[in-house]
Amino acid sequence: MANYQKNHRQYYFDSDLEKALNRVDFFRIFHTMTLRYGFDHFGILQLGNEGDACTLTNRLALHDLPSGLAEEYDKRHRFGDSIVFKSLHTSSIPSVWKSDDLHLGNGGNLLGQLGFDILMCVPVTGMNGARYAVLFLGDGEMMEQQAHFALCYDAICAFDYFYRLVLSNKAGLGLTPREREILRWISHGKTASEIALIVSVSEHTVNSHTATILKKLDVVNRTQMVAKAIREQIIQ
């Protein structure tokens, strides 16, 4: 890191961030940060476009939520209907939510549906402008203002490293421009024959590209392919 950055950035996880190289390292950093500030779990959420159909599962870039919790939530609720999700698209100000404050219906009570009492959202942005939020969830009390500011700062700093060292390096995962184009159309629900007409190739060529994309992304079907592409920021 440049000297000017060292002179102007000081945070609790300084040495850990300097040594972090991969998802495992950042999982440990965010998990430790979560517990230090009195929360139970964290999640790094990719926002994408508000109008896009989305699930909680395919928006989580990294998290330590209990196993299967996000999947069970998605079976019963629409994450895009959550007032928390909608608010993250209308404001970049950090916010704190309590479950007893959310009586909005229609999927609004995200905390109650997940089984937590308190949620802190810290909006963050990648170097390419992609919007994310670092979420902290738990069953504790409201934070004091000083602790709130400190956690926001630590989360922003840790995300900056995570984005530059992990998320930005994984974007694309070796896909060619044509493969990314076909992947985008698949994410919009187009069939192989429809995509063939759109991009002026044969249906066989589309299917061949799709098989290659599945292999490169290490997934077994189109649903997993789109979910991973969104999670890894290959498509928005």
Image (cartoon, helix red, strand yellow):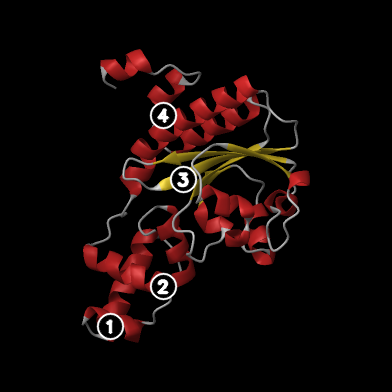
Task: Please name the amino acid that badge 4 sits on.
Answer: Ala
Spatial distance from mark 1 to mark 3, Cα to Cα? 33 Å
What residue sits right under mark 1 in the picture?
A: 196
Mark closest to the chain's N terminus, 1 or 3: 3
The tag earlier along the polypeptide, 2 or 3, is: 3
Calculate the distance from the C-alpha at mark 2 to the C-alpha at mark 3: 21 Å
Q: Are marks 3 and 4 in contact (CB under 8 Å)?
A: no
Q: Which residue is mark 2?
A: 188
Residue 20: numbered disc: 4
Assign a secondary structure to mark 3.
strand
Q: Secondary structure at mark 4?
A: loop
Residue placed at 33% from the left, 84% from the top? 194
Distance Cα–Cα, label 3 vs label 4: 20 Å
**Mark 4 or mark 1: whose residue is earlier in sequence:** 4
**Residue at 42% across / 47% down in the picture?**
131
Q: Amino acid at mark 3?
A: Tyr
